[in-house]
Amino acid sequence: MKIYKLYNQVDGFASIDFANEEIDDVLNGISDVSVLNGGSYKWSVSEDDDEKGDSPFYLGSFPIFEENKVRGIVFPNSKTAVFKVDDKSFIAVEAPLLSGSIIDKNFSDLHLFSNGEILSVWKFALNSRVLYPPIFRIEEFPLYTFVTEEMQVALRNLRLSQLLFEECDLVD
């Protein structure tokens, strides 16, 4: 079994300007990704970041894919929203939260708050005894989305321009 953290290449790529949407509420669990459903947004382009990609994640947290490129991929138990950016349809995927002791704090490269909560993680070491769903986020640190090897292969085979994978360590 292998688990991968999803993330995207940001250098050189434009981002989506979600304007006044309360998208940060999705990250904080106040609302879900459905706030984007049916919306219409624009690209935020700068001189150095002007390429319009097909997988522009939101803050690295939840994946956003050009809808026609992921057609046929099933994201089990995930909430999704379809919206337009200029003339193209995109789908945002809010993977389910996995609770419990998932992150091994002894083997992960991370920084903790004084109360023991996780501030940031540079390299994830995950509990190998967990039954992982195909796509998920971790309640202990819900900033990233993770996938199993089967989902990683399916996504990798799509050859999305910005999508990257980082294999996580699994420990007993």
Image (cartoon, helix red, strand yellow):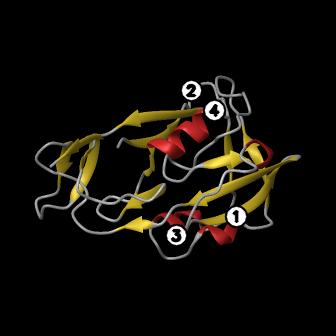
Question: Foreground residue, 100 or 19?
Answer: 100
Q: Label 1 neighbourhood size at 10 Å, few (<14), some (14-19), many (20+)?
A: some
Q: State the image coordinates of residue 154 (x, y, percent, origin top left).
A: 60, 40
**Earlier residue among tags 2 and 3:** 2
| Amino acid carrying mark 4 in the image | Asn
Which residue is depicted at the point 74% across and 67% down?
37
Question: Foreground residue, 11 or 131?
Answer: 131
Separation of residues labelled 2 and 3 (CA atoms): 26 Å
| Amino acid carrying mark 2 in the image | Asp
Separation of residues labelled 3 and 4 (CA atoms): 32 Å
**Earlier residue among tags 1 and 2:** 2
Separation of residues labelled 1 and 2 (CA atoms): 25 Å
**Mark 2: secondary structure:** loop
The residue indicated by pointer 2 is 11
The residue indicated by pointer 4 is 157
Question: Foreground residue, 21 or 153?
Answer: 153
